[in-house]
Amino acid sequence: MARITPLLWLLFSAGGTVAALFFPIHLLLTGLAVPLGWLEAPRYDAMHRLVAHPVTRLYLFVLISLPLFHWAHRFRYTLYDGLQLKHLTALIAVLCYGAALLGTAVAAYLLWTFA
Amino acid sequence: MSTDPAYTLYHPRWYRRRVSVWWWLRKRSYAWFVLRELTSVFVAFFAVILLSQVRAVGAGPEAYGGFLARLGTPLLLAVDAVAFLLVLVHAITWFNLTPKAMVVRLGGKRMPDWAILGSNYAAWVVLSAVVAFVLLRA
């Protein structure tokens, strides 16, 4: 664990930056403005063309994967300190980083095979 | 955040007063700390929404329509509203921390905090505008 700590910290801080820069606008548009009818939803064809572009796919992969690792790292320590679960160190680490890895794998699969 | 949670693994036991699991409710600064840490849960939540959006767009027009309809349900709207606020808290606390976490030197001189903060917020505005432009044009 100690050996990959710097890597996990790097993923945490990169993910925190990606989430800080890009999540508010995405969440505002996709999660609030469109469902509330302030804006029209992008038409399916246009959306499909946009996601099919390789640059968009790379962007979406980074946008999904790195923030998941940000969550894994932060949530792990919140569980240790907040709920005082220090005796479950290994289990919590496996579950948190495992979930982030799973999400990354699903994102890679969906974006790679996107048709 | 503690550095290594297992630091007392082989240490002899010593007397410790038990601290309540609700220690973070005792002081406003502790509660704020835990709230800031919990913003990450909503970050992960929205990453999952993005994942289901990609899946829906890839699966066809009906799946995309279903995705949009689901976002309009009261439950998801409420969670998205809370998530938006907490993601904003994350962004602002994150940007405000960078000058403390990262020291930038230019020509041997340390860049002042306001310059790093300013460039963070400028990047935020510009990138948000780009995302909005691309998504709304689609």
Image (tube, rainbow, N blue to C red):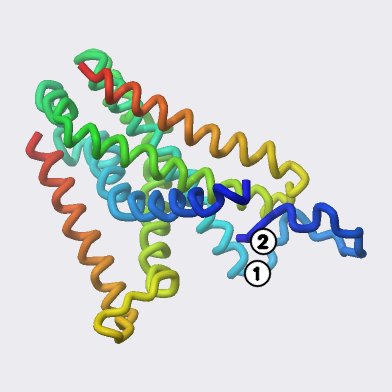
Three-letter residue code for mark 2: Trp
Answer above or below: position of B32 versus B109: above
Between the residue at mark 2 and the residue at mark 1, the CA separation in whole angstroms equals: 6 Å
- At 29% from the left and 54% from the top, the residue drawn is A21
- Secondary structure beneath dot 2 equals helix
Q: Quadrant of the N terminus of chain B?
A: bottom right
Residue at (67%, 54%) from the top-left corner? A82
- Chain of the residue under label 1: B
Answer with left or right where residue A84 lies relative to residue B74.
Answer: right
Q: Is residue B14 left or right of residue A4?
A: right
Q: Position of residue A92 (x, y in %)?
A: 65, 40
- In-image side of B10 versus B43 (left or right): right
Circles 2, 1 touching at the beta carbon (< 8 Å):
yes
Q: Which mark is residue B24?
A: 2
Question: Toward which corner of the image does residue B98 lie, by quadrant?
Answer: bottom left
Kind of residue sitting beneath label 1: Lys
B84, above or below A53, in the image: below
Q: Quadrant of residue B59?
A: top left
Mark 1 crowd level (few <14, some 14–19, many ≥20, 10 Å Cα): few
Q: Which residue is mark 1?
A: B27
State which quarter of the image contains the C terminus of chain B.
top left
Residue A11 visible (yes or no): yes
Give whichever of A86, B20 is nearer the camera: A86
Secondary structure type for disc 1: loop
